[in-house]
C-alpha cells in the first residue's frame, strides 16, 4: 500500500484524503488510520476503509438509478417532442387535403366553388401533387358551374320560348278561326266584297302560322348539328338580284321600294348559296314586314379586305335600344309588340352565319332605321 496518504492524514492534512483499497487497485477511497506501537515503537498502522462494499454497492445502485431516471425523462421528453412535431407535421401536410375536402363538400352542398379555391389561390407553395389536384378541381368546379348556369339559362329561355310561341300561334289561329267561323255562319248574308276581305284576312293569318312553323323547323335543323354548309364560289350580286325579284309584288303592295347598291368588279364569295339566300330573304322580309308602308329598303355590297360586307337597311322606326342586345336570341325572338320583334327569322340568320364562322350585327346609327351587317369571305 502507498503510505503517503496515511502519513498526510496523521500529519493533519486537509480532508478528504483518498488512499488505496487493499481489495482493488482500480480506485482510491476515504480511509481512517492510526499508528500501532509495540514496545514504544511504531510497528505499523491500523488502516480502515470507511467506504465499505455495502456502501459502495448502494452508492453505485443509487447512481445507476439516477442515470436511469434521467435517461427515462430524456426519453419521455424526446418521445413527447417527436409526437408533437409529428402531429404538427401531419397537420401541415394534410391541411391542403382538408381544405380541398371542405371545398368539395361546399361545392356538393352549394354548387359553387369555395372561396379557398378561388382562381389564383394556392394551397401549397411547392407546386406538388396536392396543388395540381387543387388546380384541376378548381378548374373542373368552375367549368361545372358555368355549364350549370348555361343549362339553367337555356332552360329559362326554353320556357320563355314555349310561352312566346304559344302566344304568337294563338293570336293568328284565333283570328283565322274567327273569320272562318264567320264565313261559315254568315256566308249567305255577307256581300262579295266583305266575304273577300274576310278570306284575305284568314289567308294572311294562315300565312303567319305557316311562316312561324317553317322558321321553327329551320331553327331546329340548324341547332341539331346535322346541317353543315356546302361551300361553293358564286357571285353575290347575282344572288342579291334574284332575292330582290321575289319581293317585287310584296313591296309593290305595301308601296315600299328596294334599292341595291353594288360596286363594279366585286369579287365572288365562298359560302353555302342556299343558306346565304335564306339570310338575305329573312333580312329583307323583316325590313318589309316590320316597317310602315312607303318605307325605303337598301341592300348594299362593299369590299372589305378579304371579305365582302353586306348591309340591309331601312328608313323605318328602327330597333329600340332595350331590344338590340338580345335581338338574335331565342328568348327575344318573340315579343308582345310585333313591330319590335324580329321573330325567329333573325335567329335563323344568326345560326346560319355562325355555321360560316361569321356574325350578324345590328348597327346603331342615329337617323337611320334598322341596319344589319355581315361579312362573307371572298
Image (spheres, helix red, strand yellow):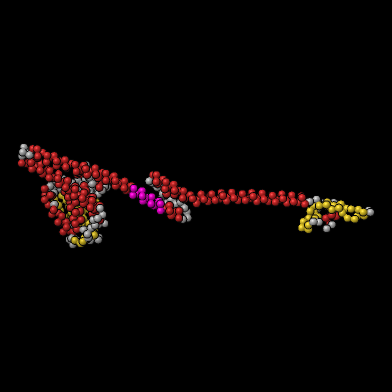
Give the extent of the magenta segment.
136-148
Toward the viewer: 210 or 120?
210
Toward the viewer: 236 or 25?
25
Residue 78 x, y percent position in the rendering: 60, 51
Instruction: State left or right for residue 298 relative to residue 33.
Output: left
Residue 173 sits in quarter? top left
Across the whole image, how many numbered discs are drawn on residues? 0
Toward the viewer: 174 or 127?
174
Toward the viewer: 176 or 75?
75
Residue 206 x, y percent position in the rendering: 14, 45
| Quadrant into which the N terminus falls | bottom right
Q: Is residue 147 magenta?
A: yes
Majority secondary structure of magenta residues: helix
| Quadrant into which the C terminus falls | bottom left
Residue at the spot x=19%, y=48% of the render? Answer: 213
Q: Is residue 314 visible?
A: no
Instruction: State left or right for residue 226 relative to residue 53.
Output: left
Residue at the spot x=27%, y=47% of the render? Answer: 325
Amino acid at each position: 500500500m502507498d503510505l503517503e496518504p496515511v502519513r498526510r492524514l496523521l500529519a493533519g492534512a486537509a480532508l478528504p484524503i483518498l488512499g488505496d483499497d487493499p481489495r482493488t487497485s482500480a480506485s482510491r477511497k476515504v480511509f481512517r488510520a492510526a499508528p500501532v506501537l509495540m514496545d514504544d515503537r511504531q510497528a505499523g498502522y491500523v488502516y480502515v476503509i470507511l467506504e465499505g462494499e455495502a456502501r459502495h454497492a448502494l452508492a453505485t445502485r443509487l447512481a445507476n438509478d439516477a442515470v436511469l431516471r434521467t435517461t427515462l425523462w430524456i426519453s419521455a421528453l424526446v418521445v413527447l417532442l417527436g409526437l408533437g412535431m409529428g402531429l404538427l407535421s401531419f397537420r401541415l401536410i394534410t391541411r391542403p387535403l382538408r381544405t380541398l375536402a371542405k371545398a368539395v363538400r361546399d361545392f356538393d352542398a352549394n354548387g359553387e366553388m369555395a372561396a379557398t379555391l378561388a382562381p389564383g389561390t394556392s394551397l401549397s407553395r411547392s407546386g406538388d401533387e396536392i396543388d395540381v389536384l387543387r388546380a384541376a378541381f378548381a378548374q373542373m368546379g368552375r367549368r361545372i358551374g358555368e355549364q350549370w348556369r348555361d343549362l339553367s339559362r337555356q332552360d329559362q329561355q326554353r320556357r320563355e320560348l314555349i310561352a312566346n310561341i304559344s302566344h304568337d300561334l294563338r293570336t293568328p289561329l284565333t283570328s283565322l278561326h274567327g273569320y272562318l267561323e264567320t264565313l261559315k255562319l254568315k256566308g249567305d248574308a255577307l256581300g262579295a266584297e266583305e266575304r273577300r276581305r274576310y278570306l284575305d284576312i284568314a289567308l294572311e293569318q294562315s300565312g303567319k302560322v305557316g311562316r312561324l312553323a317553317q322558321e321553327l323547323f329551320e331553327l331546329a335543323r340548324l341547332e341539331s348539328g346535322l346541317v353543315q354548309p356546302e361551300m361553293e364560289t358564286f357571285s353575290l350580286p347575282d344572288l342579291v338580284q334574284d332575292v330582290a325579284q321575289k319581293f317585287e309584288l310584296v313591296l309593290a303592295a305595301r308601296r315600299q321600294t328596294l334599292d341595291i347598291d353594288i360596286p363594279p368588279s366585286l369579287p365572288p364569295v365562298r359560302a353555302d348559296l342556299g343558306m346565304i339566300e335564306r339570310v338575305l330573304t329573312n333580312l329583307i322580309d323583316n325590313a318589309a314586314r316590320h316597317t310602315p308602308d312607303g318605307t325605303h329598303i337598301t341592300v348594299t355590297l362593299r369590299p372589305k379586305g378579304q371579305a365582302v360586307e353586306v348591309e340591309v337597311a331601312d328608313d323605318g322606326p328602327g330597333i329600340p335600344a332595350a331590344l338590340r342586345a338580345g335581338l338574335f336570341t331565342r328568348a327575344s325572338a318573340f315579343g308582345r309588340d310585333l313591330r319590335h320583334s324580329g321573330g325567329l327569322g333573325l335567329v335563323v340568320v344568326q345560326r346560319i352565319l355562325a355555321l360560316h364562322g361569321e356574325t350578324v350585327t345590328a348597327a346603331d346609327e342615329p337617323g337611320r332605321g334598322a341596319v344589319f351587317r355581315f361579312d362573307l369571305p371572298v
